[in-house]
Amino acid sequence: MKPVTLALALLLPLGLALPAGAQNVTVTTGNGGTMSKDRDCIRGNGAANCETTSTATTANGKTATKNRLRTTDAGGTTTTVSGMGPNGQSGTKTRKITRSN
């Protein structure tokens, strides 16, 4: 593949991407289940708060969800991930990365 064609192939999706605000997508699987992902970011004043929610639903109605909240500012990044499984099991974990000069 020619370098110009390769560069266009890599850059074109970036130009067509949605703005950094809310984005979502839903896909129906071959067996009738669905998977969806929603993303929302708020940026300003040197900070960014991004939340992503993913949901998977089987054809017979069982649902599992995952939520990720990432907050970044001059002091570092904190990420919290929580989820609920199809049988009601849940869990949460938090990771903080601190920036030092």
Image (tube, rainbow, N blue to C red):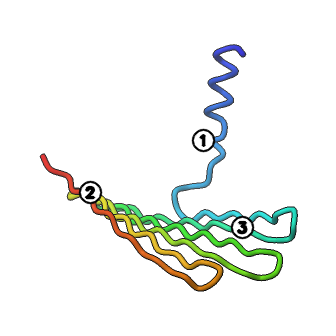
- C-beta proximity under 8 Å, tags 1 and 2: no
The local crowd at label 1, few if under 14, some if 14 to 19, many if 20 or more residues have their Cα within 10 Å, is: few
| Residue in view at x 39 percent, y 69 percent | 80
| Residue topped by disc 2 | 97
- Is 45 left or right of 4, judged from the image as shown? left
Where on the picture, by quarter, is residue 48? bottom left
User: In terms of depth relative to the viewer, which is nearer, 13 or 91?
Assistant: 91
- Does 7 appear above or below 90? above
Residue type at tag 1: Leu
- How far apart marks 1 and 3 lie (CA) works out to 23 Å
Q: Earlier in the sequence, mark 1 or mark 2?
A: 1
| Residue in view at x 47 percent, y 64 percent | 41
- How far apart marks 1 and 2 lie (CA) works out to 28 Å
Residue type at tag 3: Met
| Residue topped by disc 1 | 14
Residue type at tag 2: Ile
Q: Residue furthest right?
A: 31
